[in-house]
Image: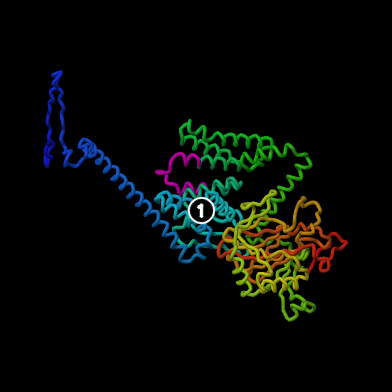
């Protein structure tokens, strides 16, 4: 029996056993760390290595704690920064969402900064947060950049002031400069923001604006900390914008700057596409007597060229005329949105304001209905004070329950990003007696049959919300060709304005030079079809972008063509117009 070692160093012994038969010696060196009888029943050799491993464990845990402290420090810093911006929004949400820069920065936070927070969280918290946070994707940030540029293009905004948080523009209708400040001085665009908006502006072929955005990017960049790759890309986009404007000296200058910023190997692969693009533009320019006629990226250019090659000369001329008209009326719409007065004085002198004759209209016999004529052929009229504040509040309350992003039918499919930025819902007459009574009032003042009319499309246009030039009937022929409305088409359109708008948001008719100011309680009405059923091409209209302020609310009612035989009969004169 060997007694257990109580304390102190290990006990070492050397034991020799003598083999009786072979007289051979076998020596065993034993290290008695423990007693196998009454000891710890652990191999002490393993404990020695465990001590070394424990030291490594401590180092690993210590590094983990350091990394966690660093992570939590980053998380705390990011959360404190986000808290400041969020507090501004919470204090006055309506005012915060009434400024385009605030909206852009909010979308940016949700699209880029909250994903950074998500990466700094542990797994259980990540899972919990993802259940509560509505994800904003990068394409929505790109759409926000497009929205800002759309406001710049429409209202000729001062880009430098906008990047600094101020909406500064000249109001043609008021003949003065108007400035709308952001809610806080910290709400301004960074160099990365200006660069993103500049790229989107370049894609949309607004080259002068793109150059201004790129110049703002340079102003907001730190020359000491900004890496050469970013500077090189910025210079290349500047070169492309100047080239599209025909300023080849500046284009070559910026291309050389871009080339000098990076090594040749890195530069070659990164700029191969741009050199091909510049070459294609150069060839087109030479073929058109030194006139730059193409302002689009190479993909669109190649697609357009291949389509034109397959068209006959007559088809190509029709196509070119169509695109020219689209561009022409887009520019007119932008002018009207800015408040430019374009209407001919002789036409304006024929327009009248009056009270509607309600003698033979039983529902309105004791009502004085104010009518303002905005155009006479075709007739576009505004009914003032046609709906009460109580009715407006009720309609907005009912519609708010099921608001969703609106889509339009484009290229034979529904498109959420094509030509319209708004959200809305549908409101039937049977949803509430007030809604039904208002529909009967519309029928009384307009003289049309409201049976089988479409539900109200209650629409909310926030800051930047718009609707491009369009018709309210099915258009399947060029506007130069006569087209009859289909049985299910809309003979007339009624738009009720459910709110006032701080800046613009008007409804404009570019072919008639008509601008309708959105005023709460008023409604605009016009016929889309002539009395013979022909489509009236002059009724093309659009909704101007809301520049700033509270959202614009409207309720649109489309009246069907098929049930108007007794109220608006089809006449033999094909070009005779419908009137109230």
x, y (%) of residue 68? 33, 49
Q: Is residue 229 above or below residue 463?
A: above
Q: Residue furthest front?
A: 21
Nearest the viewer among 121 and 9 is 9
Nearest the viewer among 256 and 570 is 570
> Which residue lies at the image location 73% right of the left edge and 65% below the top edge?
453
Q: Is 155 on the left-hand or right-hand side of 15?
A: right
Q: Secondary structure at mark 1?
A: loop
Q: How many marks?
A: 1
Q: Which is the main secondary structure of the residues drawn in magenta? A: helix
Q: Residue furthest bottom?
A: 366
The reply to whether residue 573 is in sight is: yes
Q: Is residue 440 above or below residue 189?
A: below
Q: Is residue 279 above or below residue 18?
A: below
The residue tagged 1 is 135
x, y (%) of residue 460? 60, 63
Instruction: Name the image quarter holding residue 63.
Output: top left
The reply to whether residue 212 is in sight is: no
x, y (%) of residue 340? 65, 60
Q: Which residues are magenta?
A: 211-233
- Image quarter hosting the C terminus: bottom right
Nearest the viewer among 81 and 169 is 81
Residue 23 lies in the magenta-colored region: no
x, y (%) of residue 389? 62, 74
Q: According to the image, what is the colour scheme of the structure?
A: rainbow
- Image quarter hosting the N terminus: top left
Nearest the viewer among 79 and 234 is 79
Q: Is 390 on the left-hand or right-hand side of 46?
A: right
């Amino acid at each position: 029996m060997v007694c257990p070692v109580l304390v102190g160093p290990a006990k070492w012994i050397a034991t020799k056993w003598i083999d009786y038969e072979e007289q051979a010696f076998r020596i065993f060196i034993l290290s008695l760390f423990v007693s196998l009888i009454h000891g710890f029943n652990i191999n002490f050799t393993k404990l020695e290595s465990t001590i070394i491993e424990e030291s490594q464990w401590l180092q690993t845990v210590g590094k983990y704690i350091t990394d966690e402290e660093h992570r939590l420090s980053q998380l705390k810093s990011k959360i404190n920064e986000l808290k400041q911006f969020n507090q501004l929004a919470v204090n006055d949400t309506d005012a915060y969402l009434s400024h385009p820069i605030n909206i852009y920065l909010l979308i940016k936070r949700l699209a880029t900064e909250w994903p950074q927070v998500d990466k700094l969280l542990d797994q259980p918290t990540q899972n919990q947060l993802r259940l509560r946070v509505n994800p904003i994707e990068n394409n929505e940030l790109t759409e926000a950049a497009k929205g800002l540029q759309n406001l710049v293009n429409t209202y000729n905004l001062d880009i430098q002031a906008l990047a600094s948080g101020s909406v500064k523009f000249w109001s043609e209708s008021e003949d003065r400069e108007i400035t709308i400040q952001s809610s806080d001085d910290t709400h301004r665009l960074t160099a990365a923001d200006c660069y993103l908006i500049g790229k989107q502006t370049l894609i949309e072929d607004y080259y002068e604006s793109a150059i201004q955005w790129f110049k703002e990017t340079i102003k907001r960049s730190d020359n000491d900390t900004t890496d050469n790759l970013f500077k090189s890309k910025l210079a290349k986009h500047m070169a492309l914008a100047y080239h599209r404007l025909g300023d080849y000296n500046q284009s070559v200058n910026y291309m050389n700057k871009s080339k000098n910023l990076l090594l040749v190997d890195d530069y070659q692969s990164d700029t191969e596409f741009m050199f091909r693009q510049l070459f294609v533009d150069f060839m087109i320019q030479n073929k058109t007597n030194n006139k730059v006629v193409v302002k689009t990226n190479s993909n669109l250019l190649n697609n357009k060229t291949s389509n034109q090659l397959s068209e006959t000369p007559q088809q190509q001329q029709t196509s070119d005329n169509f695109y020219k008209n689209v561009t022409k009326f887009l520019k007119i719409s932008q002018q009207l949105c800015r408040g430019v007065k374009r209407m001919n004085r002789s036409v304006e002198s024929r327009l009248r304001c009056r009270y509607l004759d309600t003698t033979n209209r039983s529902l309105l016999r004791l009502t004085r209905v104010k009518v303002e004529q905005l155009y006479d052929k075709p007739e576009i009229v505004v009914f003032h004070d046609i709906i009460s504040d109580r009715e407006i509040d009720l309609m907005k309350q009912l519609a708010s329950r099921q608001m969703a992003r609106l889509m339009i039918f484009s290229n034979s499919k529904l498109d959420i990003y094509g030509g319209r930025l708004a959200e809305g819902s549908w409101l039937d007459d049977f949803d509430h007696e007030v809604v039904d009574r208002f529909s009967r009032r519309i029928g009384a003042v307009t003289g049309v049959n409201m049976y089988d009319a479409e539900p109200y499309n209650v629409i909310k246009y926030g800051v930047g919300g718009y609707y491009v030039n369009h018709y309210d009937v099915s258009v399947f022929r060029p506007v130069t060709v006569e087209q009859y409305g289909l049985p299910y088409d809309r003979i007339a359109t009624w738009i009720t304005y459910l709110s006032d708008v701080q800046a613009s948001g008007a409804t404009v008719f570019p072919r008639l030079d008509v601008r309708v100011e959105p005023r709460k309680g008023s409604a605009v009405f016009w016929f889309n079809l002539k009395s013979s059923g022909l489509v009236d091409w002059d009724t093309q209209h659009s909704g101007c972008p809301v520049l700033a302020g509270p959202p614009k609310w409207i309720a649109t009612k489309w009246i069907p063509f098929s049930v108007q035989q007794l109220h608006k009969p089809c006449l033999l004169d094909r070009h005779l117009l419908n009137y109230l």
